[in-house]
Amino acid sequence: MPSNYRITSPESPDYNCIAWAAGTDDRWWWPDNQYTAYWPDGAPREETLAAFIQAYSLVGYVPCDTSDYESGFEKIVIYTDERGKPTHAARQTQTSRWTSKLGNWEDIEHDRPDNQTTSL
């Protein structure tokens, strides 16, 4: 967890960081093979960076070169583990900080993410 953060919502099991990064707080997003979680139609149900990029592209995001703040743009970063499997996502706020959902717990606002893989 980032060291400089503030809690911005109460705990909720209704959605996860992947959904929250896309601006959704009404359902859990994950490309599970059992179809128990929501995943955008048209994106492969795979735990791959390419599948996550495609899922976010279906709701209006496009890859960009940097996670640096740019006025007028809303950005997402996708974190991956050492094998390239997505593990977390965060969304940039209008104040240039970032917002994340922590599993079933709270949403937080925090400083610029470290070690992100891909910016959208």
Image (cartoon, helix red, strand yellow):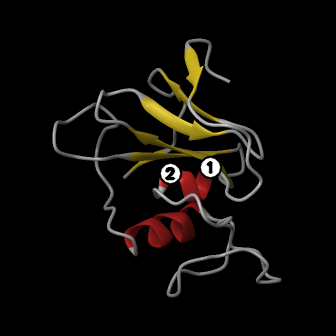
Between marks 1 and 2, how big is the CA–CA gap?
6 Å
Residue found at the far right of this picture: 34
Left or right: residue 56 compared with residue 86: left
Q: Where in the figure is residue 111, as x and y percent of width and height?
A: 47, 20
| Contact between labelled residues 2 and 1, with CB atoms less than 8 Å apart | yes
Which is more toward the observer, 83 or 56?
56
Q: Looking at the picture, tell me which residue is in the foreground, 103 or 6.
A: 6
Q: Which residue is mark 2?
A: 21
Per the image, the residue denoted by label 1 is: 17
Residue drawn at point x = 50 percent, y = 36 percent? 99
Element at label 1 = helix
Given residues 103 and 89, the one toward you in this image is: 103
Locate residue 39, reporting x and y percent: 61, 76
The foreground one among 73 and 45 is 73
Residue at screen point 30% across, 27% down: 95
Residue 12 percent coordinates (x, y): 73, 48
**Amino acid beneath label 1:** Cys
In percent of width and height, residue 72 lies at: 16, 44
Compared to residue 113, the image places residue 40 above or below, namely: below
Height in image: 70 above or below 56? above
User: What SS does tag 2 mark?
Assistant: helix
* Badge 1: residue crowd in 10 Å (few <14, some 14–19, many ≥20): many
Quadrant hosting residue 33: bottom right
Q: Residue at x 56, y 18 (%)?
A: 5
Crowding around mark 2 (Cα neighbors within 10 Å: few <14, some 14 to 19, many 20+) is: many
- Tag 2: amino acid: Ala
Total count of labels: 2
Q: Is residue 58 left or right of residue 20?
A: left
